[in-house]
Image: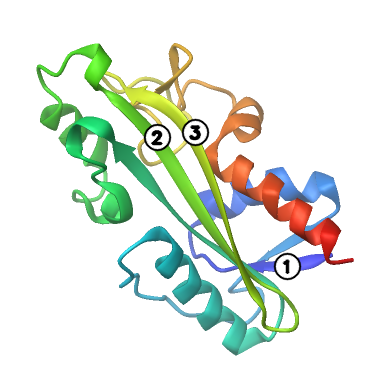
């Protein structure tokens, strides 16, 4: 099976390929499919943003497509940055800003979860939403050299996501959970 991933994010493309290709699903980028566009994320929630991206790429390629919108929800910040995770701070300053906003907040109030919502549009144009989450907490400093985005401050079982090897992270992440559910949909549509 071949599917287009509606993203220009090379890190996300690499992660999705690492998870899906061992399952026999070829993942091509939207650029490889001829959809050289940047879709503005104007949705009010993860579902709407994922749909906007998937629909725009599907309209150009008419191929099965998946798009995700994901972000970090922090309990102490009432779910922020949430859908605005990518626009929460200037490039490269997301973790620093988050640590600053949680300065003085005790460990038990630093709960957080990564959320991933995938919109899958099949070859017939029918769309489906799939949600994955992983719970953790926000650390007190940036740790590790792997991952991307908020990974250096997202603590999972005593380590940051940036400290966990990618194969291990890809087994437990919010995106991995959503992609596992997506593979179940593929299996049911055959």
Query: At which x and y percent is residue 76?
Result: 20, 31
- Mark 2 Cα-neighbour bin, 10 Å: few <14, some 14–19, many ≥20: many
- Total marks drawn? 3
Question: Which residue is label 3 attached to?
Answer: 134
Q: Can residue 96 be seen in this view?
A: yes
In the depicted structure, whether residue 3 falls above or below residue 133: below
Q: Nearer the viewer, residue 29 or 52?
A: 52
Q: Are marks 1 and 3 in contact (CB under 8 Å)?
A: no
Sequence-wise, the earlier of marks 1 and 2 is 1
Q: Between residues 11 and 134, which one lies in front from this camera angle? A: 134
Of the 4 image quadrants, the one containing the N terminus is bottom right
- Give the Cα separation between the discs numbered 2 and 3: 5 Å
**Would you say 65 lies left or right of 44 here?**
right
Which mark's residue is nearer the viewer, 1 or 3? 3
Q: In which quarter of the image is residue 144?
A: top left
In terms of secondary structure, where does tag 1 sit? strand
Q: Residue at x 56, y 59 (%)?
A: 118
Q: In this view, does 5 lie above or below 140?
A: below
User: Which residue was labeled with disc 2?
Assistant: 113
Percent position (x, y) of residue 168?
Answer: 63, 25
- Secondary structure type for disc 2: strand
> In terms of sequence position, does the residue under pointer 2 or pointer 3 come before the other?
2
């Amino acid at each position: 099976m071949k599917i287009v991933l509606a993203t220009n994010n090379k890190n996300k493309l690499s992660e999705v390929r690492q998870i899906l290709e061992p399952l026999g699903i070829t993942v091509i980028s939207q650029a490889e499919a001829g959809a050289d566009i940047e879709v503005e994320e104007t949705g009010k929630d993860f579902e709407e943003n994922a749909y906007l991206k998937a629909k725009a790429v599907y309209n150009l390629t008419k191929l099965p497509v998946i798009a995700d919108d994901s972000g970090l929800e922090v309990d102490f910040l009432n779910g922020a940055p949430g859908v605005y995770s990518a626009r929460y701070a200037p490039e490269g300053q997301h973790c620093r800003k988050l640590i600053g906003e949680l300065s003085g907040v005790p460990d038990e109030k630093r709960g957080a979860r990564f959320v991933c919502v995938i919109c899958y549009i099949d070859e017939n144009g029918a769309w489906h939403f799939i949600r994955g989450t992983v719970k953790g907490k926000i650390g007190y400093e940036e740790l590790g050299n792997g991952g991307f985005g908020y990974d250096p401050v997202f603590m999972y079982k005593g380590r940051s996501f940036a400290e966990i090897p990618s194969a291990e992270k890809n087994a437990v992440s919010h995106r991995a959970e959503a992609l596992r559910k997506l593979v179940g949909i593929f299996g049911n549509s055959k």
